[in-house]
Amino acid sequence: MSLCLVIDEMHPNLPDLLQDVGVELHYRPDLKAGEVPAALAAHPYEGLIVRSKVRVTADLLAQGPQLRYVCRAGAGVDNIDEDALAAAGVTLLNAPEGNRDAVGEYAVGLLLALLRNIVRADREVRAGEWKREANRGEEIGGKTIGLLGYGHMGNAFAKRLQAFDCTVLAFDHDPQVAGNHHATLVSLAELQARAEVLSIHIPYSPANHHFVNEEFLAGFRNALWLLNTARGEVLDHAALVRRLQTGQLRGAALDVLENEKLATLTSEQQARFDYLRAAPNVVLSPHVGGWSFQSYERINHVLARKLREFLSQ
């Protein structure tokens, strides 16, 4: 049996799923971040399963010299130093297939909320205001939706957009990514020339930090509605706020922020956040796009399948 340490809360089906593939779990979601290195050093673990409690760095890996694999229970791996894993000969497994459907559905919900003023109208009616004309909205049908990134999440969103009679374009910097019947792959220049809505689906990495910045947004011909269900750090929020203030962006729906620990915002971040939460054309949610009851369970099935394949090599 391969011995594996689990340091974050997981769906309760995990022990049975992993026992079937030859993995014995030490399930320790009670561990605080500072306690993880000592726990890792206490046993000859071959595996580590994490969500977001810790950053997996070279220093942490040094506490588990027998580690063979690290599993990220989710899609994003921005809390994992992939170079450090490669140097240590440790394999990284993640599970974007587990929550891509949740993200795809949620992005549709954000787009509808943004174009049809659903959140604003709800607040007004609860306050006793009945403003029909002020809440006249836009239809998705007939619009050109641009996707920045066409991996699992972009594909899932594009698939669901097919019901809306809109045009879906996608740009991905990876030359191995191909278009399909859900979206047409185009150059970045064509995406900027045609898109009326921009939805961000690229992972965070140092190379992608503030990839969507003032210069990038200035390249779009149309005033955009912007969605971000990826990572907050890929979007320059200073540029976002400036363009909302000037009307160069028609609105934004953000499931992720530049700093999601709201009690730790710098003065500049606080000023931007105060603007966003007061703006009537901005929809905010707390990084729950991929967080459904179904995805919580499905992620474990994906990890179990990938672990079976890895351990059988």
Image (tube, grey):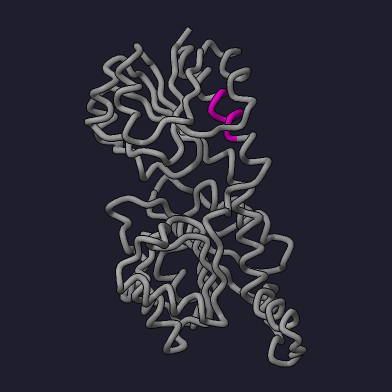
Residue 230 is inside the magenta segment: no
Depth check: give the residue in front, 169 or 148.
148
| Residue at the image position 27 percent from the left and 26 percent from the top | 61
Rendered-image quadrant of the C terminus = top left
Number of numbered discs: 0
- Residue 188 appears left or right of 38: right
Q: Residue at x 47, y 88 (%)?
A: 247
Note whether residue 278 is visible: yes
x then y, percent, for residue 113? 66, 71
On screen, residue 180 above or below 35: below
Q: Is residue 115 left or right of residue 71?
A: right
Farthest-out residue, top: 1
Residue lying at the far bottom of the rendered structure: 133
Counting from the top left corner in percent of width and height, residue 193 is at 45, 76
- Front-most of residues 213 and 266: 266
* Magenta residues, start to end: 299-304
- Name which residue lies at 56% across and 23% down: 304
Taking the image as shown, residue 178 lies to the left or right of residue 261, namely right
Residue at 55%, 59% (x, y): give it: 184
